[in-house]
Amino acid sequence: EARRVVAFGLRLRQPTSFFNSTDGIAVLGEAMPEASGIYELEIRASKLFSQDGFCRADVGVIVDVNDGRRLGSGIWWEAGDGDVYVAQDAGGKDGVGGWICAEAAVENGVLPKWDDNSIVGMVMDTHRCRLGFTHDSTLLPFEISVPRSALPLHFAVGWSADTAGVIRIDSWRRLLEANTGAIATFLTELRSFACQADADSAKRCGQATTRYCMRAQSVDERA
């Protein structure tokens, strides 16, 4: 059970002005090599706290597991405003690492904000090299392409030095390719987002709360 829970920065809640907290990340689960299946992670956040009221906790995928910097590698969904950060080794923004919407906090990111008791997660299709996002077990319409050179990936969570909280892994699973059955239906529905996601990507910042109800029905592996 202890391996399913990540606690960070909780001493920030103590009534003292002295603390020695740093940014950090925690890698979750096994590697996701190219063409090895579709992987889904769901986490549940609790006891979130930040010194300035803006929660800088993230869930994402990481390319370089040896890079311990927050936002140093991979793709990250930030709790505070729903914006997504793409590091240079995951394709970047305009050739360098950056936020999809803006460097400063935004009112509406490309994805919903998340907070205490939210269930958020990601779906990584290693065949198409596309990353999807879930909120309260619902697959969201926003997808992002991942360079094949970035694989294998790992799921991860990250946080800034001024943020505290507890994150629990609700599920980690791998869905295999299939020609029929529930997994095939899930893959067909997931891939149907590709054309719409590419065509509408410029408009997503104002439509982050739109949801599509499509859930995987078969489980191959569970943490």
Image (cartoon, rainbow, N blue to C red):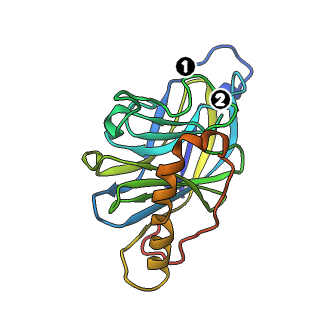
Q: Which residue shows up at 55% across the image and 19% down it? A: 20
> Is residue 223 visible from the viewing direction of this image?
no
**Cα–Cα gap, marks 2 and 1:** 28 Å
In this figure, which residue is indicated by the disc labeled 2?
106
Question: Within 10 Å of the Cα at label 2, are there few (<14), some (14-19), or many (20+) other Cα atoms?
Answer: some
Q: Which residue shows up at 39% across the image and 49% down it? A: 145
Q: Which residue shows up at 59% across the image and 22% down it? A: 104
Q: Which residue shows up at 49% across the image and 78% down it? A: 185
Q: How many marks?
A: 2
In this figure, which residue is indicated by the disc labeled 1?
20
Q: Amino acid at mark 2?
A: Val
Q: Position of residue 24 (x, y in %)?
A: 47, 32
Q: Position of residue 41 (x, y in %)?
A: 50, 58
- Where is the N terminus found, in terms of image quarters? bottom right
For this orientation, the residue located farthest to the left is 149
- Front tag of 2 and 1: 2
Question: Within 10 Å of the Cα at label 1, are there few (<14), some (14-19), or many (20+) other Cα atoms?
Answer: few
Measured along the vertical axis of the image, is residue 61 above or below residue 23? Answer: below
Q: Amino acid at mark 1?
A: Asn
Give whichever of 17, 64 is nearer the camera: 64
Q: Quadrant of residue 150?
A: top left
For this orientation, the residue located farthest to the front is 199
Circle 2: element type: loop
> Is residue 175 visible from the viewing direction of this image?
yes
Measured along the vertical axis of the image, is residue 45 above or below residue 181? Answer: above
